[in-house]
Image (cartoon, rainbow, N blue to C red):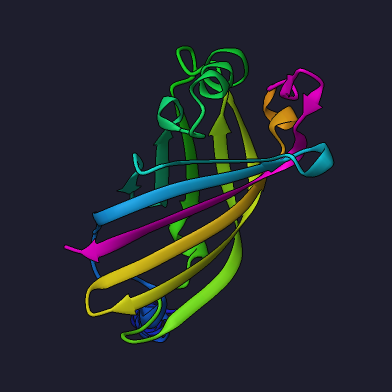
Amino acid sequence: MNMNKTVRLLSVLLLCAAPAIASGPLKTRGPAEVNFVAQGPAGLRIEGKSSDLSVTDRPDALVVTVPVNKLDTGISLRDHHMHEKYLESQKYPNAQLAVSRSAIKFPAEGQTTEGTVPATLALHGQSKTVPVHYRATRQGKSYNVKGDLKVDFREFGIEVPNYLGATVKPPVDVNVAFTLDET
């Protein structure tokens, strides 16, 4: 294939893919949140959250970073155990989720897209590929994004949390929500 045909073919492919690619770099705006729900026996339900997360737009991936020492369950003793004994947040301060930009379908203006994509979760000094379900809605140059994943903490070398006979059952449900603006 000669060079002119190659350039035309690439141009056609890029035009066809245009709705799937954000037109510029993306920057986090407004409130963001990460929530988790862990369950155990006899209706045990532990909910935690943090509004301290950042999203970095790299050429290859969108990376969500959560400082794990900011996760809060509303009970200080439980938080202390979670941070010191299980997450070891002094030694492993962040959890990072990297989603390949090529896997994400960016919606057109006024549209919503969703899908399940592979992502790399780095937690507790280990990295694993996990499926992430996302939903993105575009309004002007903003994307409202929600993502859901299940985390089996044992796969990251974190022991099963247990306190006074109550044991958390893996996996833990994790949800993130944030807004990205095209710059």
Label tally: 0
Indicate yes or no whether the magenta region holds residue 166.
yes
Residue at the image position 33 percent from the left and 77 percent from the top: 138
Horizontal arrangement in the rendering, residue 62 relative to residue 119 (left or right): left
Residue at the image position 40 percent from the left and 50 percent from the top: 33
Q: Position of residue 143 (x, y in %)?
A: 33, 69
| Front residue (pair 70, 105) | 70
Q: Position of residue 20 (x, y in %)?
A: 42, 76
Horizontal arrangement in the rendering, residue 3 relative to residue 98 (left or right): left
Residue at the image position 34 percent from the left and 47 percent from the top: 55
| Front residue (pair 178, 64) | 178
Q: Quadrant of residue 90?
A: top left
| Front residue (pair 165, 30) | 165
Q: Quadrant of residue 161?
A: top right
Indicate yes or no whether the magenta region holds residue 63.
no
Q: Main secondary structure of the magenta part?
A: strand
Residue at the image position 23 percent from the left and 80 percent from the top: 140
Q: Give the vertical position of 132 relative to 153 (above or below).
A: below
Q: Position of residue 126 (x, y in %)?
A: 61, 26
| Region in magenta | 158-183
